[in-house]
Amino acid sequence: MGTKRKSLESKGFKVGSAQEFLNLSPEEVNYIELKIALGKKLQAYRKAKRFTQTEFARRIKSSQSRVAKMESGDPSVSIDLMVRSLFALGASQKQLEKIVA
């Protein structure tokens, strides 16, 4: 156990995971982790293509703020939009399978 954790617990704080704090089911945790992975991969593909968020948003007929939300795994963004955006950047089905796996 780390020193910081011991110090916090000695002061009455409870230390745990986000899953415990938010009372998330394993399925909910997996869903969140998938969205985060898709968002990171989307950002990596966009940068590899040397698009700004604004340029990419124009390509997919969206907004820069929506692209930023996709890249951060925002809950308001559907996985469907994230997958379609990855395809728009040239990702293959095999590459998407690796992200999901």
Image: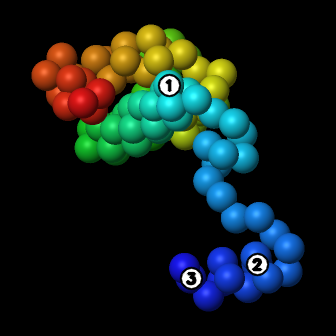
Position of 16 relative to 26 (above/below): below
Looking at the image, which residue is at 37% across and 13% down?
84
The amino acid type, in three-letter code, at marker 3 is Gly
x and y percent of residue 28 in the render? 55, 27
Query: How far is the residue under mark 2 from the one under mark 1?
Result: 30 Å
The amino acid type, in three-letter code, at marker 2 is Leu
Number of marks drawn: 3
Q: Nearer the viewer, residue 27 or 87?
A: 27
Quarter location, residue 47: top left
Looking at the image, which residue is at 66% across and 78% down?
5
Left or right of residue 50: residue 28 = right
Residue under pointer 3: 2
x and y percent of residue 26 in the render? 51, 31
Looking at the image, which residue is at 39% across and 38% down?
37
On the rendered image, what quadrant is the N terminus found in?
Answer: bottom right
Mark 1 Cα shell of 10 Å, populated few (<14), some (14-19), many (≥20): few
Mark 2 Cα shell of 10 Å, populated few (<14), some (14-19), many (≥20): few
Query: How far is the residue under mark 1 from the one under mark 3?
Result: 29 Å
Q: Which of the numbered marks, if any, corresponds to residue 8?
A: 2
**Pointer 2 or 3: first along the chain:** 3
Residue under pointer 1: 27
Q: Are marks 2 and 1 in contact (CB under 8 Å)?
A: no
At numbered mark 2, what does the secondary structure look like: helix, strand or loop? helix
At numbered mark 3, what does the secondary structure look like: helix, strand or loop? loop
Q: Are marks 1 and 3 in contact (CB under 8 Å)?
A: no
**Pointer 1 or 3: first along the chain:** 3
Query: How far is the residue under mark 2 from the one under mark 3?
Result: 10 Å
